[in-house]
Image (cartoon, rainbow, N blue to C red):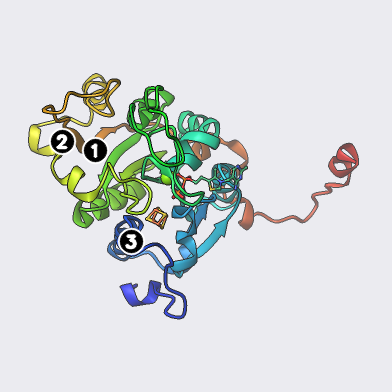
Amino acid sequence: MTELKDLEITYDKPNWCPGCGDFGVWISLKNAIVSLNLNPWEVVLVSGIGCSSKLPYWVKTYGFNGLHGRPMPVAEGIKLANQGLTVIVIGGDGDQYGEGANHLIHAARRNIDLTVMVHNNQIYGLTTGQFSPTTDIGEKNKANPNPIIEVPLNPIALALSAGATFVARGFAGDNKQETQLITEGVKHKGFAIIDTMQPCVTFNHKNTFSWFYERVYKLEEEGHDPLNRIKAFERAEEWPLRKVLEQNQKERIPTGIFYKEDRSTWEDATLQIQKAPLVKQSMENRDITPLLRELM
Ligand SMILES: Cc1ncc(C[n+]2csc(CCOP(=O)(O)OP(=O)(O)O)c2C)c(N)n1
Ligand code: SF4
Ligand SMILES: [Mg+2]
């Protein structure tokens, strides 16, 4: 049985800033792997580039740290080669909702069996605080002195409309809930996305832990039915806001599972891998020379 210590690489600890929300997501992921009783060699973490994308270095599973915005095609390739593996994509809001948004949309509508964990700190952390697609409207900082005028992208509504079959929001300040969401997302057969609010204590001085503690609420405590797609869209619209609030107003931020759907996966419908994963298929009597010639 896997224990938390089996997933630790003790000679190399995370170099995130002290207090960074990435720590909460990291420990929740390791808790989820343990509670799912997965062995380290059955899991592959695939990430892009960003503070959050360094996470695979510090979990003793298979890992692939690739290009900014590009973990999804790598993860899809791994899953198609061996659908027996648990493949988890790790990225930031810049990685997944900016540079990699196109990959995210198409993987969601394919319903490939991946779990995507987006560390949403509403900023580009690694490159020192430029605004991202999810930065709140009206924000300004040293890197961007003029108030931002674009409405923020709504990750939950985007994932729902793209066709994701498990859509959730977590918060790095609630490890218990985050562990449950990752566990449920991995168990779900199909495309699961967990958008996690992850305070960047160094560059985002607005969306702090205490700011979130005052605003988050749990969908299940308000009787939300995750099988109801229309209601999921309604809850998704509650936040992020499309306008700047007056000083005495306060938004409410729903967390938990917005939507779940049982739909056939891409792997299930791909004829070539229905009998066995590619890695288990014999290459005997298969001549790939004509294919190589065509490509040369
Ligand atoms: C193709 C490409 N474009 C841009 C960059 C520069 N870059 C590296 S990380 C990053 C953004 C990181 O923000 P996010 O994905 O939100 O991760 P965080 O650091 O906030 O966790 C950018 C723009 C890059 N490395 N490669
Ligand atoms: S810059 Fe922000 S996101 Fe990056 S490690 Fe520091 S606190 Fe975390
Ligand atoms: Mg970010």
Task: Give the Cα distance between marks 3 and 2.
Answer: 24 Å
> In the rendered view of the protein, which quadrant contains the C terminus?
top right
- Local SS, label 1: strand
In front: 287, or 209?
209
**Would you say residue 107 is visible in this rendering?**
no
Compared with residue 144, is residue 188 higher up or lower down, i.e. above or below?
Answer: below
Q: What amino acid does circle 3 point to?
A: Phe
Residue annotated with mark 3: 23
The x and y percentages for residue 178 are: 25, 51
Residue annotated with mark 2: 219
First in sequence, mark 2 or 1: give its number.
Answer: 2
Q: Does the Cβ of the disc 2 residue fall within 8 Å of ligand 3?
A: no
**Would you say residue 58 is visible in this rendering?**
yes
Mark 2 and mark 1 residues within 8 Å of each other at the beta carbon: yes
The x and y percentages for residue 81 are: 60, 50
Mark 3 and mark 2 residues within 8 Å of each other at the beta carbon: no
Compared with residue 55, is residue 251 higher up or lower down, i.e. above or below?
Answer: above
